[in-house]
Image: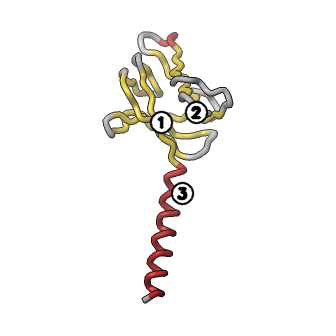
Amino acid sequence: MKYLRSLAILATLSLLASVSALARDSTKRTVTITDPVTIGTSQLKPGDYKVEWQGAGPAVEVSFIQNRKTVATALAKLQTDDSQVTQDAVVLDKASGTAGTLEEIDFAHQKEALVFGQSGM
């Protein structure tokens, strides 16, 4: 009986360890976009989005999720920087017309930034 209990505990711990390892590979942040933006071939309306990517970079695929639905995906370069901003910063290129093109997202109080639209990613 002790053997089965020990085996069950060991199996549970190994399952929890593997689930937590998978969770660490995915990074999620939230960002508020205040103006319409173009990312790749998609246009994002102003609103709150969950931004999610897999891996440690430098090249990552980023998903923009709103109301539990992925509304856009794009390739980005994940950069780390010691200068942490105090609020989210969404950097746009406004030269492309009414909707700006998303160039970068710096996350508040984090060392991560996502840079979009660079060649060679």
> In the picture provided, is 5 more to the left or to the right than 111?
left
Task: Determine if residue 113 is in view.
Answer: yes
Image quadrant in which the N terminus is located: bottom left
Vertical order, 4 against 27 (above or below):
below
Vertical order, 98 against 91 (above or below):
above
> In the picture provided, is 47 more to the left or to the right than 102?
left
**How far, Cα to Cα, is label 3 from label 2?**
21 Å
Can you give x and y, in whole percent of width and height, for residue 90 in the image? 51, 21
The label on residue 29 is 1
Looking at the rendered structure, the kind of residue marked 2 is Gln
> In the picture provided, is 86 more to the left or to the right than 81?
left
Q: On the image, numbered disc 3 is attached to which residue? A: 21
Q: Which residue lies furthest to the left in this view?
A: 67
Can you give x and y, in whole percent of width and height, for residue 79 in the image? 64, 33
User: For the point 48% across and 87% down, which residue is it?
Assistant: 3
Specify few, some or many for label 1: CA neighbours under 10 Å numbering under 14, 14-19, or 20 or more. few
**How far, Cα to Cα, is label 1 from label 2?**
10 Å
The reply to whether dot 1 and dot 2 touch (C-beta < 8 Å) is yes
**Of discs 1 and 2, which sits in the foreground?**
2
